[in-house]
Image (spheres, grey):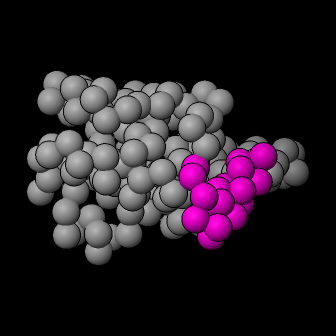
Amino acid sequence: MKKLIVIVGMLVMSLASAAMGEDFMYSDEVLDKIGELKVLAEAKKDMPAEFAGIKMVDVAEAYSLWKGKKVVFVDARPKAQFDTETIPGSIWLDSDKLLEDPKLANGLDKSKEYIIFCSGIICRRAPGGALELQAQGFKNVRYFRGGMPEWKAKGYPVK
């Protein structure tokens, strides 16, 4: 009987930890894709134009969605860049830290739609963050590949 109680207790603790995201680990496939993005970024090559299961958004669609306040914009650039200027209403998410600590996404609502962006087509942070969020079960993640450079080139608002 004591063994059963111990086993049930361990199971309950394990399930509680998993529910809080403490035991989440990215799959080898996701880690490999993120590694490939890092190699591309180091070589100053363009990031892929598409990812399985992640919707792409161009600058016109991003602006339209921003104006309609239908999505949450996620700035994946370094914090200093976010603090200097960003798309108004954006939240900041460090995709490198999210890779190390998946619990950082616990404050995000999985039922919302997110557009993640960074410093343009050679920046790995937005596609990496999109892959990380998708791996954690976020179903509505879009990748704005052109990011801040395209947004600013169009003369769209920044804060």
Percent of width and height locating residue 141:
46, 34
- Image side of residue 89 versus residue 123, left or right: left
Which image quarter: residue 77? bottom left
Asked if the stretch drawn in magenta spans residue 32, the answer is yes
Which image quarter: residue 59? top left
Percent of width and height locating residue 151:
25, 46
Percent of width and height locating residue 34:
66, 55
Query: At 50% across and 28% down in the image, what residue appears?
Result: 55
Q: Is residue 154 above or below residue 71?
A: below
Q: Quadrant of the N terminus?
A: top right
Percent of width and height locating residue 16:
60, 47
Q: Is residue 60 above or below residue 29?
A: above
Magenta stretch, overall SS: helix
Query: At 12% across and 57% down in the image, what residue appears?
Result: 159
Q: Can I make out residue 20 in this image?
A: no
Q: Is residue 158 above or below residue 110?
A: below
Asked if the stretch drawn in magenta spans residue 14, the answer is no
**Magenta residues (range):** 29-47
